[in-house]
Amino acid sequence: MKRSLIFGLTFILLVGASIFSMGVGAVSIPTGSVIQVLASHLPWPLSFNPADTIADTIVWDIRLPRTVLAVLVGAALAASGGVMQGFFQNPMADPYIVGISAGAALGATAAFALNLDIWFFGLNAVSIAAFACALIVTFLVYMLSRRGGRVASTTLLLTGIAIGSVATSFTSFLLVMGGEDQRRILFWLMGSLSARRWDHVYMLFPYVVVGMTVVLFFARDLNVLLLGDEQAAQLGVRVERVKIILLAAASCLAAAAVCVSGIIGFVGLLVPHLVRLIVGPDYRILIPMSALAGGLLLILADIVARTAMAPAEMPIGILTTLLGGPFFLYLLHRRRGGMV
């Protein structure tokens, strides 16, 4: 009952923060008008009378897709982080530990440097290149970590760090040679939800649905993997198969999120820590709670990013890093062995 109460409260906070977020901006829109706009787009017979045209355009075409995208990105990063921490049995693991962020950064930077102007299903070359390179790097890390048909978590972790470092060095080189594109590249690397539209939501949504479904389906197996590979195998878990599936699902979640938002750090590291302290280590509960909390955190961070330096906008990745860094140091200080 306690977990259900916490889940329900988090969901209510998420809905409330979303509605508030859609009313905040250069043009302030009252909460009642936001609700009226949303209600006016509901199918018959639930629809209300059409709201004010200007408010309708701002809320439905500009702020709603950005808010939905913040929820999806936060949920994807947080769920991916929770899986990675269980997969590696390491509380310092996050979605980028196997080089996902480094691969995405390299792909996006290369697209900027080559001035690619390709559009596919409403997405530009930067998003496509970021997603593709993130998955390529993850696949490369996995293949280089295989020993005798098996993949040790420690080997995978160290290989990811090494490949990620190589990708980061290439990104730095392209950034130095970027010339006029340096500012655009830096802004993307720091993460932002600015100028995101429904096309980005449509691109990310299937990956979040499929990835979350797969992760939740194997949540029990992930709980068993925490006992160790040998004991998990004795309990009937096909260890290597489950590891491949979980790694692929978590990597796709993080890569898809990165390709539409840029690199937003510490969400996948911070949120599962907090959720684990509140609801415990059972991944059947931890994953959905982390997804809700991740969406809530990113919406709140996006509100601050849009208002703190108005009319300018702060990259959202700066805020999550400023929040996550000190708190993570606090968790490390309080930690007394094992996972927090």
Image (tube, grey):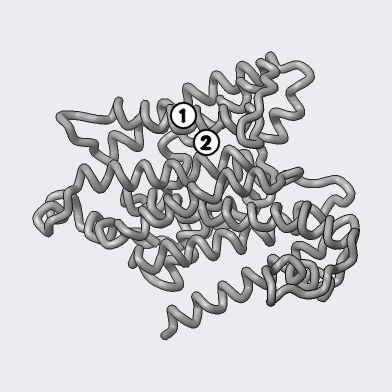
Query: Could you say which is closer to the camera, residue 226 or residue 43?
Result: 43
Dividing the image into 4 quarters, which one contains the C terminus? bottom left
Examine the rendered structure and indicate whether residue 15 appears above or below residue 191: below
Quick check: 252 above or below 205?
A: above
Count of numbered marks = 2
Q: Is residue 133 visible?
A: yes
Closer-to-camera residue (61/177): 61
Q: In this picture, is 68 found above or below 95? A: below
According to the picture, the residue beneath numbered tag 1 turns out to be 164
In this rendering, position of residue 149 left or right of residue 122: left
Which of these two is toward me, 43 or 263?
Answer: 43
Q: Position of residue 141 (x, y in %)?
A: 36, 29
Vertically, is 244 above or below 71?
Answer: above
Label pair 1/2, CB-CB below 8 angstroms: yes
Residue at x 17% of width, y 32% of height: 149
- Location of the N terminus (image quadrant): bottom left
Residue type marked 2: Ser
Image location (x, y in percent) of residue 181? 75, 22
Residue drawn 69% across the image and 28% down it:
185
Residue 26's x, y, as percent? 89, 55
Q: Which residue is mark 2?
A: 101
N-terminal of the pair, mark 1 or mark 2, is 2
Give the class, few, some or many, for how many residues have Cα within 10 Å of label 2's Cα (few <14, many ≥20): many
Please identify, in this view, whether the residue under mark 1 or under mark 2 is nearer the observer: 2
The residues bearing labels 1 and 2 have C-alpha atoms spaced at a distance of: 8 Å
- Tell me the amino acid under the disc marked 1: Gly
